[in-house]
Amino acid sequence: MLKLLFLVFISWVQLIGAVVPDCKSGTIIFDPPLDRSTVTWYPRNFTNNAPLYPNNYNCTYQINVPQGWFAEIQLTVSSTTVQVIDQMGRVETTSSSNSEFFYFIANGGKLKLSTGVTSANFGFSVLWKQYDNPTYAHKYHVSKSEAVPFSYDLYGNKPIVVEAETRVSATILPVNRYKTQYLRGIIYLDGPNFTSPCLGTGLQLLNGNTQFVSKGNFLTVLILGNSGSNPLLLFNDFYNMNGIKRFEAIQCDAICSEMKIDASKGRSVFQVDNGKSQYILQKMTGFGKLDVYAGNLTPEKRNLIASYDLTADNHLSLPQVFKGWFTTFVMESGNCTISQTNSDAYSLNIDYGRKGIITSAEYGTSWKIQDVVTKMYAPGNAKFQYSVKSVDLKTWDSLEVVGRNDQQVTFRQKYNSTNYPRLNQNVQFYASEMDVIFDSISLNTGFLMQYSVEKSAVCQSFWTIFVAVLVFLV
């Protein structure tokens, strides 16, 4: 029995020696093969199951990449730590990876293996690939006047070149966790071509809670990995993004998680992709001032729609519905925790004492599709009050406010290009329902309205008859 165990042990030692190459110099260098269509495996006889490395095994694997090419690496490791060091010297540490993708551009990067006191499984493959023809790059432009981020929904592997009036700001919305490995293959370059200096990867951008900013007017994005990872790449003119210390973003197309905004070190921005629908702020706690923008933030605050003092009682202002594609929260100092959803139900029924805002879909941005239909229902007969703060009405555009009691119209006011509302003037009517309809055909910047609702002290039946007669006479 002892003899059998000894033979098994000897066989295992021989297997380790046969599978695991020596690393006496401390570094093993990998250059592209003559036939770059072939995959290089390390160790050479490793295909699917990563071999077992002994303890106290240390080695650095230098993977060289020529200009115009990139290296696609699939790394498998368990029970130990591997450092992945890219061409900029940035380090990502992993201890559990099953054929995960990593990418190096010129001049290459390193993998550093250190097994420590335990043995570990380790192996990788490398495939060198050439960039797509730069003449086929998708080209886009962003300007200071745009209050909505330019969003690029990733498809295909064509590179992207973005030009700005001043400088290009790049941010990113997250993807499903199992797809984050492909963000390593989104490479941001500071300039108009493939040889421009590297700013970092999509994963570094996401994990850093920051923005990448070009030094000049151009920024190039290489798509090296799986284009089906579906991140949303966002671009702005840096004129609108200057001074941001922290940036976070989410896609709110289902149940939205609670989010924290930390502005303890300066301006913090939290951006929500509403899925081209609507977004509902349910609750907020913290201290400081919270500004809300339709779309992106702008220095002139032309699309600022709400400001909240977090030390005050804001419960009568919530939940608040925000329309449009993006909603951006900005804090200059302090911190805040917000709860959110996109459920339509939150926009229907309101309580007495409620106050809030109603806006067009992309308020503050010259946009053709600004249409909005908002309906609110009070518990009973109520005094509604509204004030139009801003509106842009071209020839065929209109803004209409309708009050109803039991489906009967008790109030109607329609504004158009020849009948503008008086801005900041309070208008009151009595009803149990308020409808706001903005119908736009031409390019316009939309509207912003504030409203409140109080319990009515007026006899409902008398008021309904009186207003119905008044509407009829008008």
Image (cartoon, rainbow, N blue to C red):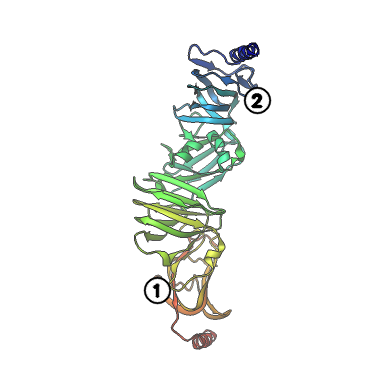
Q: Nearer the viewer, residue 266 or 370?
A: 266
Q: Identify the residue shown where x is 34% and y is 60%.
A: 311
Please name which of the two marks, 2 or 1, marks the residue nearer to the observer: 2
Residue 195: which disc? none
As helix, strand or loop, the secondary structure at mark 1 comes to: loop
Determine which quarter of the picture holds residue 344: bottom right
Q: Identify the residue shown where x is 55% and y is 86%.
A: 472
- Please state the horizontal and vertical placement of residue 401, each as a whole percent of the image: 51, 73
Tag 1: residue type?
Answer: Gln
Q: Identify the residue shown where x is 48% and y is 12%.
A: 25
- Please state the horizontal and vertical placement of residue 467, each as a whole percent of the image: 50, 85
Determine which quarter of the picture holds residue 99: top right
Q: Earlier in the sequence, mark 2 or mark 1?
A: 2
Tag 2: residue type?
Answer: Asn
Residue 48: which disc? 2
In the depicted structure, whether residue 300 falls above or below residue 106: below
Determine which quarter of the picture holds residue 7: top right
Residue 425: which disc? 1
Q: How far apart are the two marked residues, 2 and 1, measured between alpha carbons?
A: 72 Å
Mark 1 surroundings: few (<14), some (14-19) or many (≥20) residues within 10 A:
few
In the depicted structure, whether residue 13 falls above or below residue 111: above
Q: In the rendered image, is residue 145 in sight? A: no
Q: Nearer the viewer, residue 329 or 7?
A: 7
Mark 2 surroundings: few (<14), some (14-19) or many (≥20) residues within 10 A:
few
- Please state the horizontal and vertical placement of residue 387, each as a whole percent of the image: 42, 71
Q: Identify the residue shown where x is 56% and y is 31%.
A: 97
The image quadrant where one finds the N terminus is: top right
Q: Taking 224 as reference, is 87 left or right? A: left
Q: Nearer the viewer, residue 286 or 320?
A: 286
